[in-house]
Amino acid sequence: RIGGATTAPAPRTPPEDTKEEGGLPEDEPQALEDKPPATEAKKNTPSDDTKATAILAQYGFIPGERHTVASLEAYSNYFKKKYFSERGVPTDVSVRDLEGEFWRLIESSADTKQEVEVIYGADIATLEVGSGFTSPGDDCLDAPDQKKYADSPWNVCNMPYNPSSCLKHVEATTGITVPWLYFGMTLSTFCWHVEDHHFYSVNYHHFGDPKVWYSIPASHSEKFERVMRERLPHLFDAQPDLLHSLVTILSPAVLREEGIPVFRAEQHPRSYVITFPNAYHAGFNTGFNCAEAVNFAPVDWLPFGAAATEQYVLAKRYQSVAHDQLLGTLCVASETQLNFTPTVALVMRHRVDLERTRRAALTDAGRVGEGKIVKMAGTELAPDLFEKDCSVCQADLNWAGVRCECKGRKLFCLRCFDKKECKHGNEKNTMLIRSTIDELEAMCVRLERLATEFEANKDKAPVETVSEEWIACDSCGKWRRVPGAMANALGDDDKWTCAENSRPNFNTCDAPEEKMGAGTTWVGKE
């Protein structure tokens, strides 16, 4: 999508005089993602997309005219030549010159306000227009040397599905596991934000002028949010979740005054920038360029994702990834990916303890009818709450939910139902659960045992398991290691000699007998 924006006076000015600088947000899907309508939405209630567009427009981010890559490049070059000129003659400007002008515009007062419109081709779905990286099904006839990158782990299309990424267990989602493209122009910006669900992100710069990035360590994210609210109280009073809209920019100088460390990086073509979980980042483009970004999630992201889920519930924000569902999937995956177990076990233990407390709060208070705790079975009486959300806070109900027998038979998460007053009594309310607490506890115990074993063995030399067998040469009598299939094909009366060995270093009777390597486990016949 192409978006324009006008630059703004200083953020401290009243709301009616304030417009934030930049184009559409750079690499965060939240501002423009499609979201499901609220349960039983009232007539004439604008959709979440409409609301997001209205919020963006309020701060100067408005949809612009359509562009091709060539026309946007021409516009950006024309803008830079006209904007940075003396008496009509274009002047050379460095990245630092552009950076100084960018922040001058952002921090200008109402008295010296200068409006500048820029365009940003942001959040362009690669599913529709194609990725800048090749894919396994592409023959690369125009550039054969690119074919080798189809399966590269550094191909951003592959990163979410890396064997070590939790997102490989999530269905394809545009902007999260399916990359977005970004075409920037001079002074277009991406405002302060963290990634959806506090994921890692990777941004690859395909070509063009540099990007300038600013980032804040996750350890200072809470303080950053507090400072933003203190510096822009009128904006946050009007819209408490303003940071989710990606329309807020505040200079690194101001943040450093508050004791918040801000790091700067220049990103040039053919380079990557990786952002870490819950680390706020922002930046701008120094000219026309093209980048591609996507999220990924090594297992160390999991605690950040759990914290993000609780924050989303408080903000009643839609969750693009069902965290409880993913956590259950990772419990199963940990059986074969033992390096997952220490982290998954810790997060699972905390989550199960929360679930135990929340269920007990409702049952002890008599909020659920007697005998009305039912396992999900996909029936009318015991529906499966897979991909169902709480009607109040939009929390994932994969583990448990309460069906209220009041009008509409709405579904609630355990948190929200604990605060709800039922006008029709509690005897008919049903708690639907996927697993009992005993079953969840058993999963925790299993994970903790696997984690203990993994920690005890991780520093030991890896054990190589070989699907081969040892057989003796009928000519020289030496033992040789051969593929199991070859050994199994030999009958009891069949002869075998070293000359038939497929391993070149041991295919003559003159070769020394091979010794079994240390740390190797033979899985052949006794």
Image: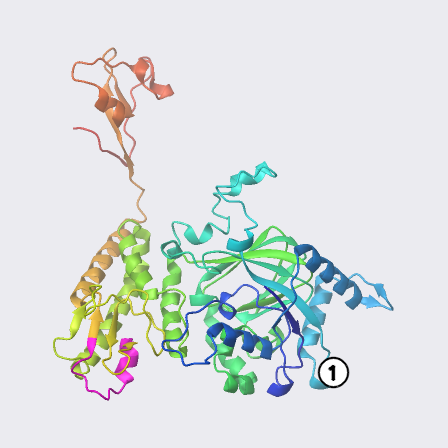
Q: Is residue 419 magenta?
A: yes
Closer-to-camera residue (441/234):
234
Picture quarter with the N terminus: bottom right
Residue 69 picture quarter: bottom right
Compare residues 107 and 26 and report the one nearer the observer.
Answer: 26
Residue appearing at x 56%, y 56% in the figure:
292
In the rendered structure, the answer to whether residue 396 lies left or right of residue 199 reads left
- Over which residues does the magenta segment extend? 412-430
Question: Does residue 455 appear in the picture of this structure?
Answer: no
Q: Whole-percent x and y of residue 35?
A: 44, 69
Give the residue pinned by disc 1: 112
Residue 66 falls within the magenta-colored stretch: no
| Secondary structure type for disc 1 | helix
Residue 332 in picture, x, y percent from top left: 27, 55
Tell me what residue is drawn at x 69 percent, y 72 percent. Answer: 117
Q: Is residue 456 left or right of residue 269?
A: left
Asked whether 37 or 277 is in front, the reply is: 37
